[in-house]
């Protein structure tokens, strides 16, 4: 065949993710393709663009919009049977074993008064 066939295992040069693709594809996603383009076109003295990877679901705190119960890694409220809001990354409190989001414990940044 002209272009080759069959899936080969590749490692994405932008994020390092291993994926299956044909012999011509080197990027795992369009976002990594764009990142590679930006990195090739950037000036050497500029800081490289770093894109955060999505956190695994078990590290994200969700809150029910009706009863305000919090869940770690569960997107649906067991009591209300509705989908929860994403609060952000977090974990379990070491003292009470309740889900706590990072935004709850991190100090909020305010603009300095001029």
Image: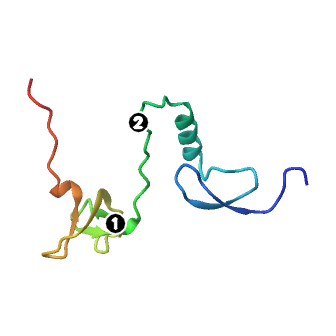
Neighbourhood count class around disc 1 (C-alpha, 10 Å): few under 14, some 14–19, many 20 upward:
some
Residue beneath the point at 41% across and 64% down: 56
Residue 5's quadrant in the figure? bottom right
Q: Which is more foreground, mark 1 or mark 2?
A: 2
Residue beneath the point at 76% across and 55% down: 23
Looking at the picture, tell me which residue is in the foreground, 14 or 112. Answer: 14
The quarter of the picture where the C terminus appears is: top left
Q: Residue furthest front?
A: 45
* Earlier-in-chain disc, 1 versus 2: 2
Relative placement, left or right, of 58 versus 93 is right
The relative height of residue 93 versus residue 11 in the rendered view (above or below) is below
Residue tagged 1: 59
Indicate the position of residue 103 as horizontal and vertical percent values.
21, 54
The quarter of the picture where the N terminus appears is: bottom right
| Callout 1 secondary element | helix
Residue beneath the point at 17% across and 57% down: 104
Residue tagged 2: 47
Neighbourhood count class around disc 2 (C-alpha, 10 Å): few under 14, some 14–19, many 20 upward:
few
Q: Residue furthest right?
A: 1
Residue beneath the point at 66% across and 50% down: 26
Looking at the picture, tell me which residue is in the foreground, 32 or 69. Answer: 32
Indicate the position of residue 50 as horizontal and vertical percent values.
43, 44
| Callout 2 secondary element | loop
Relative placement, left or right, of 37 versus 88 is right
């Amino acid at each position: 065949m002209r272009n080759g066939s069959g899936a080969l295992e590749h490692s994405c040069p932008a994020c390092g993710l291993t994926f299956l693709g044909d012999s011509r594809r080197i990027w795992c996603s369009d976002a990594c393709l764009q990142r590679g383009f930006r990195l090739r076109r950037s000036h050497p003295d500029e800081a490289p663009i770093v894109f955060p990877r999505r956190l695994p679901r078990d590290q994200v705190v969700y809150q029910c919009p009706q009863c305000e119960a919090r869940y770690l890694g569960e997107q649906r409220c067991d009591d209300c049977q509705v989908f929860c809001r994403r609060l952000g990354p977090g974990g379990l409190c070491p003292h009470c074993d309740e889900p706590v989001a990072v935004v709850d414990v991190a100090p909020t940044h305010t603009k300095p008064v001029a």
